[in-house]
Image (tube, rainbow, N blue to C red):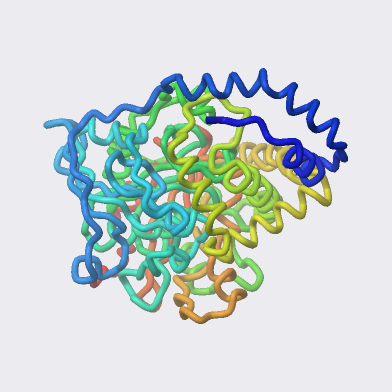
Amino acid sequence: MVRVPDPGRLVELARSAFGLRLTEEEARSFAGLMEASIASYRRLDQLAEPELPVKYPRTGGYRPGPEENPLNAWYYRCSIKGAGEGPLAGKRVAIKDNVAVAGVSMMNGSSVLEGYVPAFDATIVTRILDAGGEISGKAVCEHLCFSGGSHTSDTGPVLNPHDHTRSAGGSSSGSAALVAAGEVEMAIGGDQGGSIRIPSCWCGTYGLKPTHGLVPYTGVFPIELTLDHVGPIAASVSDVALLLSAIAGEDGLDPRQRDVRVGDYPGALKGGVGGMRIGVVREGFGLPGLSEEDVDETVRKAAETFRELGVEVEEISIPLHRDGIHIWNAIAIEGATELMVRGNGMGTNWEGHYSTSLLDAYWRGRTALPGELSETVKLTMLTGQYMREAYGGRYYAKAQNLARTLRAAYDAALEEVDLLLMPTLPMKATPIPAPDAPREEVVARALEMIPNTAPFDVSGHPAMNVPCGASEGLPVGMMLVGKKWAEETVLRAAHAFEQTGSYRVPSAPG
């Protein structure tokens, strides 16, 4: 039962939270005045809240052993069958472990959430099952999804299928690794700074970050409302299109969804690309201290392949692209601190479905075990709290204002061309840090790769990793970016490139 605080606690709360200095007499007065409001909270405890539906029977699954999990990419295995027929019939789907699946453990890569079992399905889980797909399990993701490497999950690092000493990328690390290894045809990933495209690039899979809001985020653990995206990873463009068609569209419960436009994604693959215009973005190449020459060369060579398909390819310049990472940093750091940490993953001031059981479990774990948060999460919340206390949130506000400028810069370029092209990541998969690696190395390997991916989480444009070659036995990916709601154009171009067979990544040994 919710209780009115005693005067002593109210005195301390007023001082620590707001800098107010109450006398004992004032505190007793305020405590008495709070009684009427607290009565409303007690009444809320007596009312039943709406829950997301669970339409299909299932068992809770199991934690696989090493012999069944050589890449450490599965968190839980299960088999949840959906409708008897549909566009995803016969397709096995792995679900990133920041997505709720009723009756199956959910850890989000962090021990602070371990033991939580949701009683509801995320909207996209229900849609996959309605489309005839089979949920084959939960894929390991990074610690609270705050890493582009694959080494921060509390279940241990996810191994790159092509080289087990290298990162699989993150934060949807297990999702891409399982697809690349052929254990599933499709997977769900999430993307706030590149977390669908990063592991897709380093594992050699196709991964699409949709337009912001195209796919409902309901029932997925958030990081920052304006950056949150969820979307498909698959071994082929056609399977990306199939999965996207199953999960796209408004659900009426997600504030990220406004004026959503759903297309015919499988149908888009039937069209040609002759006459299409692609702009090779100069600022996406040659990133100081990051870009590897073989990666840049491989992507430029892949761009030339489009010419052979009748596409007009030209180099263009978007100077503000290089500042996209700085705009992203302010939004992600302060926004995540407010929503993911102080707001216990749900925050306030938005309409939609709040997953209160997830909030409760995370709040209890986070406050009981703060020392077990990953180094990247600690760095984020320390920086975010400092910036909020020292500067009052003005830099988050300025970054959100500049986000419109960044979006407009991409929109202007996309008036001249149909797609933007650049390396998905500036480097090949990096070595997994040793267990005793210094904090500086752990953080660097988690965050260094995102300058090309993160800006499109800010702008909300659809962006897709397309495997375009390999160097030193490791996949290289190019990123195609389209106008908002133009996933059909992105997929059509990716499919045309895939069909040339010119640049196939090496088969993953498993």
Q: Is residue 297 above or below residue 84?
A: below
- Residue 41 visible in the shown view: yes
Residue 166: quadrant of the picture:
bottom left
User: In the image, is 354 to the left or to the right of 76?
Assistant: right
Q: Nearer the viewer, residue 370 or 59?
A: 370
The percent coordinates of residue 435 (x first, y second) are 46, 79
The percent coordinates of residue 385 (x first, y second) are 72, 52
Q: Residue at x 29, y 59 (%)?
A: 74
The percent coordinates of residue 185 (x first, y second) are 23, 51
User: In the image, is 284 to the left or to the right of 117?
Assistant: right
Q: Is residue 373 above or below residue 272?
A: below
Q: Is residue 239 above or below residue 235?
A: above
Label total for image: 0
Q: Nearer the viewer, residue 250 or 316?
A: 250
Q: Which residue lies most toward the left here?
A: 84
Which quadrant is the C terminus positioned in? bottom left
User: In the image, is 365 to the left or to the right of 21?
Assistant: left
Q: Nearer the viewer, residue 75 or 22?
A: 22
- Residue 271 visible in the shown view: no
Residue 447: quadrant of the picture:
bottom right
Q: Residue at x 36, y 64 (%)?
A: 203
The percent coordinates of residue 176 (x first, y second) are 35, 57
